[in-house]
Structures are given as structure tokens and as C-alpha cells.
Image (cartoon, helix red, strand yellow):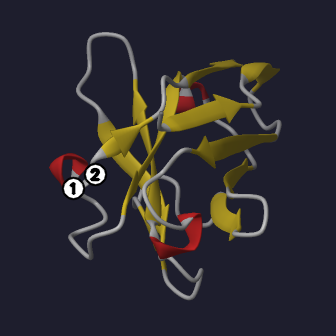
Amino acid sequence: QVQLVESGGGLVQAGDSLRLSCAASGLPGSFSAYDMGWFRQAPGKEREFVAAISWGGGSTWYADSVKGRFTVSRDNDKSTVYLQMVRLKPEDTAVYLCAGDPARGNRRIIHDYNYWGQGTQVTVSS
């Protein structure tokens, strides 16, 4: 059974930091073969791309809205991907979901990911 389990969300104030984790298990093959992405969905809005990291960690991608504030990383030995978020803003409030896929599609595209977690809530108060 494939599981992507996010953790680390919470309620913080603007300017604070959070570190999200996504632990993977049950993926077909090795976690190290999977590109991993982070997406977010705010109430009443569509799911949007946040960041992604290639299977080996050598390439990363970011949405313009988070570039310079968020950092995606991974530990393949722990089958875990991270999202370090600093200088959080109220507009970062959303459910954050991680996703994974072994293919080499467009890492910014929702439909290019086959496996998804349930998400963790991040709320940033002003």
C-alpha cells in the first residue's frame, strides 16, 4: 500500500518558519527513483504547484511565489522529502500535499504525479 504522509504543518504568525516532511512507504520500486513535488490548495482555490525535486536531488523547481523563501530537499535513505518554509505570509495558508512519480514529466504539472499524500494544514496569521 502506497503511503505519502505529510507532517509539520501548524498555525504560525507571518514571518515565522515551518518545516514540512513527507514520508513515503510502499512505493513501487525505490523512493530514490521518484521525482517528488509539493503542492498546496487553499479554500476555494485550485491546487497549485509549490516546489519539486528530482529523484537524486540534483534539480529543484519552485513557484515564483515561494522562490527565495521555500527550500525543497530530500533524504533518500529515509524515503522522506522536506519543504523548509521561511518568512511565511498569510497567503501561504493552505493544505500542503506531497506527490511523487517515477516518470520524468513536467514536475510543475499536477497530472504528472501518480501518488499523493493527504496533506497537512499550514495556517499563517497576520
Secondary structure state at the residue bearing disc 1: loop
Mark number, residue 109: 1
Q: Residue at x 36, y 11 (%)?
A: 43
Q: Residues within 10 Å of mark 2 (few under 14, many from 20)?
A: many
Examine the image and state in which quarter residue 39 appears.
top left
Nearest the viewer among 49 and 21 is 21
| Distance from Cα at disc 1 to Cα at disc 2 | 8 Å
Residue beneath disc 2: 113
- In this figure, what is the number of numbered marks? 2
| Quadrant housing residue 71 | bottom right
In which quadrant of the rendered image does the C terminus lie?
top right
The spot of residue 7 in percent (x, y) is 72, 30
Q: Is residue 26 left or right of residue 21?
A: left
Task: Identify which residue, 101 or 93, lies in the foreground.
Answer: 101
The kind of residue on which mark 1 rests is: Ile
Type of the residue with mark 2 = Tyr
Residue at 48% over, 33% down: 1
Identified at 54% across, 44% down, the residue is 26
Q: Position of residue 4 (x, y in %)?
A: 55, 37
Crowding at dot 1, Cα within 10 Å, few <14 / some 14-19 / many 20+, comes out as few
Q: Are marks 1 and 2 in contact (CB under 8 Å)?
A: yes
